[in-house]
């Protein structure tokens, strides 16, 4: 039982990181109906920015803020340079899908040119593991979980109660109808991608902090798990995605701990395949409900 609780604790840390990445991805999808295959590179850029800022200042807080800012800037640039152009011209889903994959490869190779392909290591102290209820966490892992809960709460308040959140929901449900009612759908989509980028950039920082090392390809690998969580919860439905991320994060930690961590991606694809076969709209969605219910 002790080992089970320890693994569950590690799974909650993984789920916290995964939930931020998955919610950011599903927000991007909600307002543009584009599955952004370059989403993982936003995480990677966030990780590298945090690394550079921490190397220069020694401040973990500034590193986190730098990661979020870089993620928001890159996501906004992606939307302006590619996504918005394709959506406005009525270009189909498949060409846009391929374009995001192209952005992914371009960013990866640019990062290789700048930083090289070798792993980079953080020097951020993790703290000694200590008991937190039934779990064994380091100070860094506690901060990851606390920050993920805080960011999730802020996103909930923004989406549920603000004017921007109402516009976001309107655009996600029917872009043309939202435009007719006077909502600037392009501006809302751009702002949503920026918000998603902020969250994804920070997720890249805490993921790299948790793993300890990273390279230009590490975000793309984690994106495959992010996609599984988003589809499991319900693609385009942020609050359902949170539940999907928690389940996938815990399941992967148990399978990695009791079988082999090297099969993590394979297990993620197995979960994705099962969800698509059994509940293609997601485990926590209903066809009669709106996008954000």
Image (spheres, rainbow, N blue to C red):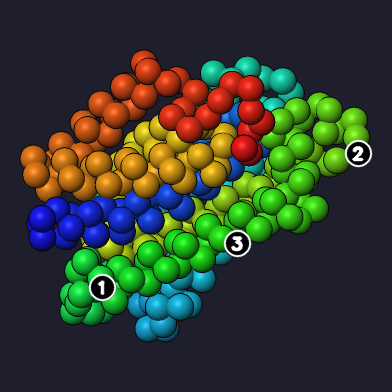
Q: Residue at x 56, y 25 (%)?
A: 286
Single out the mark in the foreground, 2 or 3.
3
The reply, left or right, for residue 77 in relation to residue 5 is right
**How many other residues sit within 10 Å of disc 3, few (<14), some (14-19) or many (≥20)?**
few
Which element carries disc 1, helix, strand or loop? Answer: strand
Q: Measuring from the top left, give residue 82's x and y in whole percent.
A: 62, 35
Q: Measuring from the top left, give residue 188's x and y in whole percent.
A: 75, 45
Q: Residue furthest bottom?
A: 58
Quadrant in the picture for the N terminus: bottom left
Single out the mark in the foreground, 3 or 1.
1
Look at the picture and state if 176 lies above or below 192. Answer: above
**Label of residue 219 in the image:** none
Residue position marked by numbered label 1 in the rendering: 132
The reply, left or right, for residue 199 in relation to residue 210 is right
**How many other residues sit within 10 Å of disc 1, few (<14), some (14-19) or many (≥20)?**
few
Q: Measuring from the top left, give residue 86's x and y in whole percent.
A: 67, 27
Figure quadrant of residue 269 = top left
Quadrant in the picture for the C terminus: top right
**How many other residues sit within 10 Å of disc 2, few (<14), some (14-19) or many (≥20)?**
few
Figure quadrant of residue 40 = top left
Q: Looking at the image, tell me whether mark 3 or mark 1 is earlier in sequence order.
A: 1
Q: Residue at x 32, y 40 (%)?
A: 248
Q: Looking at the image, tell me whether mark 2 or mark 3 is earlier in sequence order.
A: 3
Figure quadrant of residue 167 = top right
Residue position marked by numbered label 2 in the rendering: 182
- How far is the residue under mark 2 from the one under mark 3? 26 Å
């Amino acid at each position: 039982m002790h080992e089970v609780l320890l693994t569950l604790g590690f799974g909650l840390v993984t789920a916290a990181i995964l939930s931020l990445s998955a919610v950011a991805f599903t927000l991007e999808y909600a307002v543009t109906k584009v599955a952004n295959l370059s989403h993982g590179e936003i995480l990677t850029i966030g990780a590298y920015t945090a690394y550079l800022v921490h190397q220069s200042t020694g401040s973990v807080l500034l590193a986190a803020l730098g990661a979020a800012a870089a993620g928001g800037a890159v996501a906004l640039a992606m939307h302006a340079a590619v996504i918005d152009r394709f959506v406005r011209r009525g270009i189909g889903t498949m060409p846009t899908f391929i374009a995001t994959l192209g952005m992914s490869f371009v960013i990866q190779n640019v990062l290789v040119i700048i930083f090289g392909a070798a792993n980079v290591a953080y020097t951020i102290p993790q703290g000694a593991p200590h008991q937190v209820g039934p779990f064994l966490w380091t100070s860094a892992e506690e901060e990851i979980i606390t920050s993920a809960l805080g960011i999730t709460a802020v996103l909930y308040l923004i989406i549920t109660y603000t004017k921007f959140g109402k516009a976001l929901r309107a655009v996600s449900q029917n872009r043309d109808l939202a435009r007719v009612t006077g909502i600037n759908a392009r501006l809302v989509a751009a702002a949503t991608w920026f918000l998603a980028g902020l969250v994804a950039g920070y997720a890249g920082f805490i993921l790299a902090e948790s793993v300890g090392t990273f390279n230009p390809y590490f975000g793309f690998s984690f994106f495959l798990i992010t996609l599984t969580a988003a589809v499991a919860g319900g693609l385009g439905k942020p609050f359902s995605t949170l539940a999907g991320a928690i389940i996938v994060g815990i399941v992967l930690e148990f399978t990695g701990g009791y079988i082999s961590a090297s099969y993590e991606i394979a297990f993620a694809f197995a979960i994705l395949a099962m969800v698509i076969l059994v509940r293609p709209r997601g485990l926590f969605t209903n066809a009669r409900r709106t996008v954000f219910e």
